[in-house]
Image: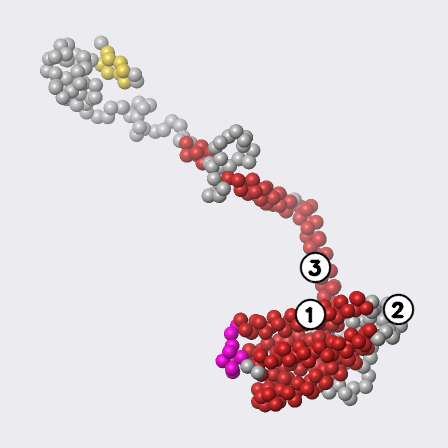
Amino acid sequence: MAYNSGATHRSRNPNANPNPNHNQNPNQDNYPYGSYDGFDANSQQFSGPFYTPSSPYDPSGPQLFEDTSAQHFNQQNTYDPYMNSGNTFMPQMYGQNPSNAPNLFNQQLLLTAGQQLLANPMAAAAIDQYGQNLVNKGKSWVGSNVKYYFAVDTSYVFKKLLLLFFPFTHKDWSTHYNPNEAIAPRDDLNSPDLYIPTMAFVTYILVSGYILGIQNRFSPELLGIQASTAMAWLIIEVIIVLLSLYLSSISCSLGFFHAIAFGGYKYVCIVALLLVSMPFDKIGYYVMFAYCSLSLGFFLLRSLHIAMQANTQTGVPNDSRNGLYLAMILCLLQPIVMYFLTKNFVFA
């Protein structure tokens, strides 16, 4: 006779006493055919495992199926943007609020679309061609505009510096032109350039740092303030010139780079003021300031007046007095800017 309990099957011990009260262990449960937990009434404990290795229920045996419960859990913890509104299982995505999940999905979608676009040979070729055209246009613009203002040599720089400090003896202030374009600055002393203003601006920053170091006031923040202030004054002057030309309807050869060049020549005088103020203190500063104001004002007045008279559209010189008034205003503005950019080093 066999005893069957669920999936567990055991045979009755033939030596077991059919009398349930015979040799009954008081610490065991009262089972009709001996103990159920691995003991018989008249025998010892089972030796060996309860399940045989060949049993499908052996926990130490080989697994018949792969455990995918962890993968299933990870898949359930990703946000699906197409989930129905009735689904209340909306776990957080990478520690963020679930309400931001659609934005993250849109970003991922755009990134994927961009990668697919770049992977397309035709699209990649079109983008490359557009970038090449843009680079070529930039090179042509730099070559035809900026490069012209840096076409200088040593002789031109030396003569131009002498012209800035001693403009009173100069006779011919007209700018020479070829049939198609203006002559480069190295071939025409009256042409404006950007090399001298750029180098003068850099020298002004270096000399400012040196003076601050002598006065035990040097700091990168203060030097940055001086550089940004000087650049801001130049930008304001250029805006004033271009806005005045537009409001006055003056058509002349004074363009954007011309305005920067003429406005940047004052940094040459500013460097001279700082260098003279170090050995001669305030007396040398006042004398140099007065002379530089006169020389720079005379130079700008003659140069700007010639530039504003040249009409690039009709070829007929402008006789309007508005250009002369604007040139005079800019000449009077230069000493004011020079004073504000140098007073912190002399009157500290």
Q: Which is more N-terminal, label 3 or label 2?
A: 3
How was the colour assigned to the protein in this rendering?
secondary structure
Residue 154 coordinates in the image, percent (x, y): 70, 81
| In front: label 2 or label 3 | 2
Q: Which residue is mark 2?
A: 314
Q: Secondary structure at mark 1?
A: helix
Q: Quadrant of the C terminus?
A: bottom right
Q: Which residue is mark 1?
A: 236
Q: Residue at x 78, y 74 (%)?
A: 326
| In front: label 1 or label 2 | 1
| Cα gap from disc 1 to disc 3, whole angstroms | 30 Å
Q: Amino acid at mark 1?
A: Ile
Residue 194 coordinates in the image, percent (x, y): 70, 74
Q: Which is more N-terminal, label 3 or label 1?
A: 3
112 is higher (above) or lower (below) than 235: above
Q: Which residue is mark 3?
A: 135
Does residue 110 appear left or right of residue 241 in this picture? left
Local packing at callout 3 (Cα closer than 10 Å; few below 14, some 14-19, many 20+) is: few
Does residue 324 appear left or right of residue 281 in this picture? right
Does residue 72 appear left or right of residue 111 in this picture? left
Which disc number belongs to residue 276?
none
Q: What segment is highlighted magenta in the picture?
A: 212-220
Q: Secondary structure at mark 2?
A: loop
117 is higher (above) or lower (below) than 246: above
Residue closer to the observer: 78 or 138: 78
Residue 253 coordinates in the image, percent (x, y): 81, 71
Q: Amino acid at mark 3?
A: Val
Asked where in the image residue 262 lies, by quadrant, the reply is bottom right
